[in-house]
Amino acid sequence: MKTPRLLLTQLLQLTALILLVAISGCQRLPSQPNTAAQPDPAIQQPAAQPSTSDMKQRSKAKQHPSVGSRYTAPELLLVLHDTHSNERTLQPISRRARMLSHTQSAIQVVGVLPVGTELEVIEAKRDAQHVLVRHQDQLIPLQGVRVSDTEVQWLVTSDECTQLSHCQPWQQQIQRCLAKSHCQTFVQFIPTDGNGSAHPGHRPPFKPEWIKATLAPARQYATRSALQLDVDPVMLEAIATGSAVEVAQLFFHQRHFHLKGDVVYAAD
């Protein structure tokens, strides 16, 4: 039978052993790897973002070779505003002269750029039929081109309008009007009945209903614009007084206004 003193000694030894094990375990804990701080290979890490200089280099590499080049307009350019889409475009006058059968009532002429205007190419895309150009502080699409991988083919030359009898007189008159705040333009109408059928071979005197139907569109436009229209209803002729833009509007919608395409000249 163990004595109380022996039991006490054994108990103290056991307690010391337990404390030694506990202290040894605490000393090993900091040396263990911190698994929570290591990235999990199963989780995809976000890719490194390209630097600003890298992005600029890539953007420059994608630019069309024509970007930054200059284009000198060989003929008048009409600034068109589509009232439906609220978009603006530049159209060479000869392009419009070749498609006068299209009425395009939603499009209005809001500006005219004279022959010789210089434009800077800002953007060109392959297979497009327009390029984005800068005029003064505006960026605007220019029609009448064909874009390949390496160049822009300008489809309009200085003789395009000259070769069209219903284009050249309008270009000359509009170009002349650009130098003046107001100019006077002589125009002649094609007799048209109430159904919209034209009678170009008919001579005066014209039927009263024809006169009314023929002059109505031009008179309505003059009423809501700054155009002054002095009409001779017997001969179906008129002198239009207005700016170059208003004369260009008459040209652009000459089918709607029943105007003869090649009978236009200065009246002042």
Image: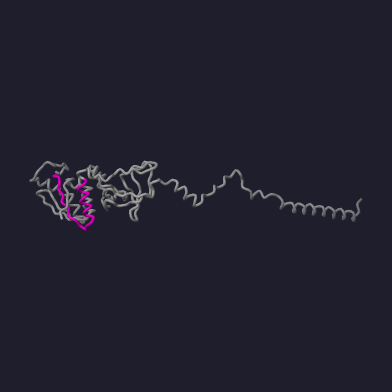
Q: What stretch is highlighted in magenta?
A: 167-191
Residue 146 visible? The answer is: yes
Residue 83 visible? The answer is: no
Q: Residue 145's spot in the image, x, y percent?
A: 32, 44
Extreme bottom residue here?
181
Q: Residue 253's spot in the image, x, y percent?
A: 22, 47
Task: From the viewer's side, name the closer residue of 209 and 49.
Answer: 49
Q: Residue 38's spot in the image, x, y percent?
A: 63, 48
Left or right, 180 with respect to 45, comes to left
Left or right, 14 with respect to 188, comes to right
Task: From the viewer's side, name the closer residue of 68 and 209.
Answer: 68
The colour mode here is one colour
158 magenta-colored: no
Q: How many marks?
A: 0
Q: Which residue is drawn at 15% across and 51% down?
A: 186
Extreme left residue here?
205
190 magenta-colored: yes
Q: Quadrant of the C terminus?
A: bottom left
Q: Which residue is drawn at 38% across and 44% down?
A: 125
Q: Residue 139's spot in the image, x, y percent?
A: 35, 52
Left or right, 91 with respect to 10, comes to left
Task: From the viewer's side, name the closer residue of 262 and 99.
Answer: 262
Left or right, 260 with respect to 158, comes to left
Task: From the viewer's side, name the closer residue of 261 and 204.
Answer: 261
